[in-house]
């Protein structure tokens, strides 16, 4: 549990330090991400981004457990 919390903290610090560089990646604007806009209402559902991130995290966790 302690190792997981420390790793989560390190990852959050890394993301925070490199946030301006990380926003250049197309995550959130991939084909398959749904965006509906009508008037003053916008509904955004990043389904493709969610699938890609889920696969990447699953692969990372699988590799660390081997």
Image (cartoon, grey):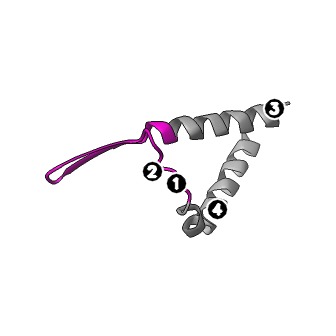
Task: Tell me residue 27's x, y (percent).
Answer: 52, 51
18 versus 12 height, above or below: below
Query: Circles 2 and 1: CB distance less than 8 Å?
Result: yes
Q: Which one is earlier in the sequence, the residue at label 4 or at label 2?
A: 4
Mark 1 sits on what residue?
26
Mark 3 sits on what residue?
65
Query: Circles 4 and 2: CB distance less than 8 Å?
Result: no
Hey, which quadrant is residue 4 in on the image?
top right
Question: 26 or 5, which is in the foreground?
Answer: 26
Mark 2 sits on what residue?
29
Indicate yes or no whether the magenta region holds residue 39: yes
Mark 4 sits on what residue?
13
In this view, which residue lies farthest toward the front?
A: 31
Marks 3 and 2, Cα distance to the nearest angstrom? Answer: 31 Å
For mark 2, give the secondary structure. Answer: loop
Task: Tell me residue 7's x, y (percent).
Answer: 72, 49
Q: Which one is earlier in the sequence, the residue at label 1 or at label 3?
A: 1
């Amino acid at each position: 549990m302690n190792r997981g919390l420390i790793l989560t903290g390190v990852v959050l610090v890394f993301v925070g330090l490199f946030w301006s560089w990380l926003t250049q990646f197309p995550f959130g604007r991939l084909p398959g991400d749904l965006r509906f806009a009508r008037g003053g209402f916008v509904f955004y559902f990043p389904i493709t981004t969610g699938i890609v991130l889920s696969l990447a995290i699953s692969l990372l966790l699988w590799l660390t457990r081997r």
